[in-house]
Amino acid sequence: MTMPEDSVPLQDTPPTPEPRPQQPPKPSPKPRRSAGELLRAAAPAVLLVVGLALTVLGFVRFTETYQQTRAYLATTVCAADAKPGADCVTLESGRVTKKQEEAGSDSTDYLLTVAREKAPSDRYGVGRAFYEDVDTGTYVELKILHGKVFELSYQGHSSRPPNTPYLAVVEFSVLIAFGMIMMVLALSVDDVEFMLPLALGYVLGTAIATGIGSLTLIALQWPLAVTLAIAVVLWLIVAAVSRATFEGL
């Protein structure tokens, strides 16, 4: 069969290519945080840990200082053949050579100058009742531990001169104050750098309050467990008030 001259032979139609599946767009890389941003993000955790460590250390130093002021109560009296510097209480007689009253703005200090047998004369603060019981020339008994006079006694009456280790009080008061404010900042403040100047001033006030409270507890000479319980409760109250103050700013 012959085809017409003007006819065109049919050609196979090529298959239509299937569309390629579109790849999901690659997520854009997250911008790296600068060192300053990382430090600011880690600051609350660092403050919390360091503040807790300082607070614990401060309470440990307070406990040691308090026990030192009460050491003579639990220490036995030295034997006759005890060596100098032994860990025991030495008994010594002394003669009152002078009585003196010093009036202050709030109270009066009662002072006795005592001439000792084995050490130079010294002046000791005593209570009013003990002061009135003795006269110039009276012999009193002194209880001495590690070179410090912890108690004067006369005919059954006794008085404890203040032996406050002020440097130790300053040390643990600053530690406790810094530790507490650091923890308060970590838990309450977003912008730590902005609050630092105010926090430093707050540390000073807290340290002064801690020192006054500690001196009061040391002077009362209550059992250690009672003293520590009172100290912790007072610390929690001050910390709660401080946190509320910083959160309100």
Image: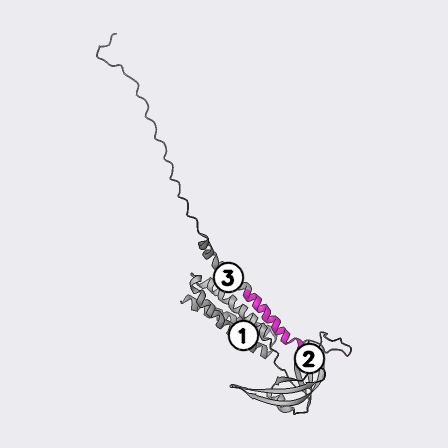
Of the numbered discs 1 and 2, the one sitting upstream in the chain is 2
Residue 237 location (% of width, % of height): 49, 71
Asked if residue 237 lies left or right of residue 149, the reply is left
Say which of marks 1 and 3 sits in front: 1
Q: Secondary structure at mark 3?
A: helix
Q: Secondary structure at mark 1?
A: helix
Depth check, front residue: 128 or 20:
128
- Which amino acid lies under the numbered mark 1 shown in the image of this protein? Gly
Mark pair 1, 2: CA separation: 26 Å
* Residue at image point 63% right, 73% down: 67
Q: Quadrant of residue 160?
A: bottom right
Mark pair 1, 3: CA separation: 23 Å
- Provide the residue designation for mark 2: 144
Of the numbered discs 3 and 2, the one sitting upstream in the chain is 3
Residue 224 location (% of width, % of height): 61, 73
Tell me the crowding category of disc 2: few under 14, some 14 to 19, or many 20 or more residues within 10 angstroms, Cα based.
some
- Asked if 18 appears above or below 189 in the picture, the reply is above
Residue 128 location (% of width, % of height): 60, 88
Residue 79 location (% of width, % of height): 76, 78
Is 58 part of what is drawn in magenta?
A: yes
- Provide the residue designation for mark 3: 48
- Asked if 241 appears above or below 34 in the picture, the reply is below
Depth check, front residue: 201 or 21:
201
Q: Residue furthest top?
A: 1
Q: Residue furthest right?
A: 81
Residue 237 visible? The answer is no
- Provide the residue designation for mark 1: 211
Q: Which residues are magenta?
A: 54-81
